[in-house]
Amino acid sequence: MPVEFSRSILAQAVAVAMIEVVQKGEYLKGAMIASPVLSESEKELFVKMLARINERRKNGQTSLNEDEIASLFNFVYAKAAEAVTNMVNIQPDNFDLLGMLDGKAPLYADDRLVGHFKKLNLAADCAQGYLDWFAANASNARLLTYDPILPLFEALKWCFRLSCTLAIEKLESDGRKIPGA
């Protein structure tokens, strides 16, 4: 009988590390938001990001330095605000990859989110949380069997989801009605 699903202890461990960062920083007031619209945004964004990473690999750049990893977290943080803005305004996503690896990700979002997101350190805290988690697990034989992009992108997915929740909480606290929330 074929296996229809699998469990990844690694993915779960990375998710816990990101959730712990958010809890320690007291970034969120309530439970994480789940939205089919934001799930589609996440999928579209991450497919594009993975394609860019694969393109780099084909060109001989097989690893990421710490600055590039931090940039990825900042990029995902900005794109979460953009995705929530698009959802609220019932606009399609048009994610570009500008700033993905150079630390200069533009923040195209509702002005309230731009101001709020610029005040917080969630992206930097998530990046540091991931780097700490990776360093603490670097000698784990199981981790060494994975492509290093997989745990990184798992952490980035959680950063995106948690950042979306942060954005929705901010808009709701400002009195904005969120469709489907």
Image (cartoon, rainbow, N blue to C red):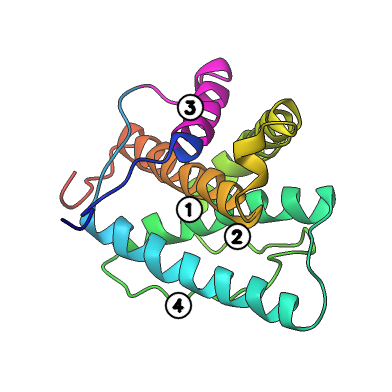
Where is mark 1, residue-wise?
81
Cα–Cα gap, marks 4 and 2: 13 Å
Mark found first going from the N terminus, 1 or 4 = 1
Disc 1 residue crowd, few under 14, some 14–19, many 20+, Cα 10 Å = many
For label 3, the SS is helix
Q: Which mark is residue 19?
A: none
Real-space Cα separation, disc 3 to disc 1, in angstroms: 22 Å
Identify the residue under disc 2: 107
Instruction: Identify the disc placed on residue 94.
Output: 4
The stretch of residues the image draws in magenta is 12-29
Q: Decide which of 17, 5 is in the foreground and name it.
A: 5
Amino acid at dot 1? Ala
The answer to whether the residues at label 1 and label 4 have Cβ atoms under 8 Å apart is no
**Would you identify the image quadrant in which residue 120 lies?**
top right
Mark 3 and mark 1 in contact? Answer it, CB < 8 Å.
Answer: no
Inspect the image, locate mark 3, and give the three-letter code of the amino acid beneath it: Val
Q: Is residue 159 above or below residue 55?
A: above
Tag 4–tag 2 contact (CB < 8 Å): no
